[in-house]
Image (cartoon, rainbow, N blue to C red):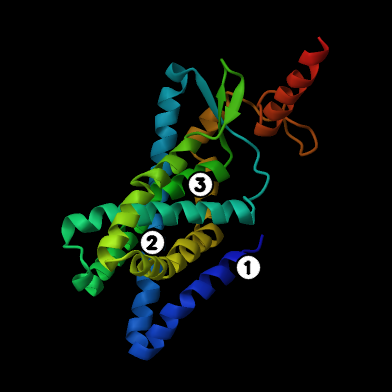
Amino acid sequence: MTYRTEYTLGFLALLPLLATGVAKGTGWLVTIIVVYVGVPLLIWSLLVNRLASLALRIICRLRESSGHQYYFERQVGKPGVSRRILRDIRVLVFVFFISALIVPQVTQVNPQNLVIVSNAFIYVAIFLLAIPSSIHVLLWVLEDSGLRCHNTTRLTVTVPAAWTSRWLSSLGGIGAFVSFAVAMGGSLDKAISLGFTLTISLLPSCILAPTLFYRRLEPGIIAKIRQSKAAMTMAGLFPQVSGPSIPSSSAPTLRSVRVTEETKQTVEPHS
């Protein structure tokens, strides 16, 4: 699977920073690349694998009392380009909104402190991208690994905690960022200009860091997850049928559940 679209968008967004880096010197340019892309990747490589192992251990302990069954579905490939870009946008929104809530608490926000506050906003955003956004990355990894939740009461199959990523992206709300930008710019026009500038500054990180993670780190983490002791325990709940051409008769999949629901809807009017 290629990632040309994400790489193209990321490098196009990175061009203004690269131009500034060339003007300021090689040291500044290297610092920008390391801080904007290298730091989030390093933190994710250290945290996500451990967080995934912890999540699986918790699931193994709670699966009986929760009334749900967890198992690993057969992998059918990575998510498409549109889904990956949607994930990038969610991370960008999360970083923007939470930064807009935090920065006014640590420094005075007004047009006179434009440079200082803008730098503080970028630093806070990179911190949020590296550490709190690891939760987003963890959820992506668990979904891409094939982990699914079978609700035996409702007869549904879902991705565990799929709602969490959307909920995290909604934290803070757009009003927080708008009020922050207006306070910084002093007027709506300046606020729009500031918002655009901050977006261009953070967009490379929110595209290139996840893309490099998908390409370089995620396959190894998924392999460890699927070969872990917790995964072996879950496999006993829904034994998979060997042979690629024979579908599993015991482990429901997201597709099978959707087909079943559509069949029910078709049959009910005739009955």
Asked if residue 8 is positioned above or below residue 25 in the image, the reply reads above
- Compared across the picture, whether 65 is left or right of 118 comes to right
Q: Are discs 1 and 2 less than 8 Å apart at CB?
A: no
Amino acid at pointer 2: Pro
Pointer 2: residues within 10 angstroms few (<14), some, or many (20+)? many
Q: Which mark is residue 4?
A: 1
Q: Sequence order check: which comes first, mark 3 or mark 1?
A: 1
Q: Which mark is residue 140?
A: 3
Residue under the point 41% across and 37% down: 55
Q: Which mark is residue 173?
A: none
Position of residue 137 measured from the top left corner of the image (x, y, whole percent): 45, 50
Residue under the point 49% across and 59% down: 210
* Figure quadrant of the C terminus: top right
Q: Secondary structure at mark 3?
A: helix
Q: Nearer the viewer, residue 211 or 49?
A: 211
Q: Sequence order check: which comes first, mark 1 or mark 2?
A: 1
Position of residue 200 measured from the top left corner of the image (x, y, whole percent): 43, 70
**Label 3 – label 1 distance at C-alpha:** 20 Å
Position of residue 7 measured from the top left corner of the image (x, y, whole percent): 57, 69
Position of residue 224 measured from the top left corner of the image (x, y, whole percent): 50, 46
Residue holding disc 2: 40
Q: Nearer the viewer, residue 124 or 49?
A: 124
Asked if residue 42 is positioned above or below residue 28 in the image, the reply reads above
**Label 1 – label 2 distance at C-alpha:** 21 Å
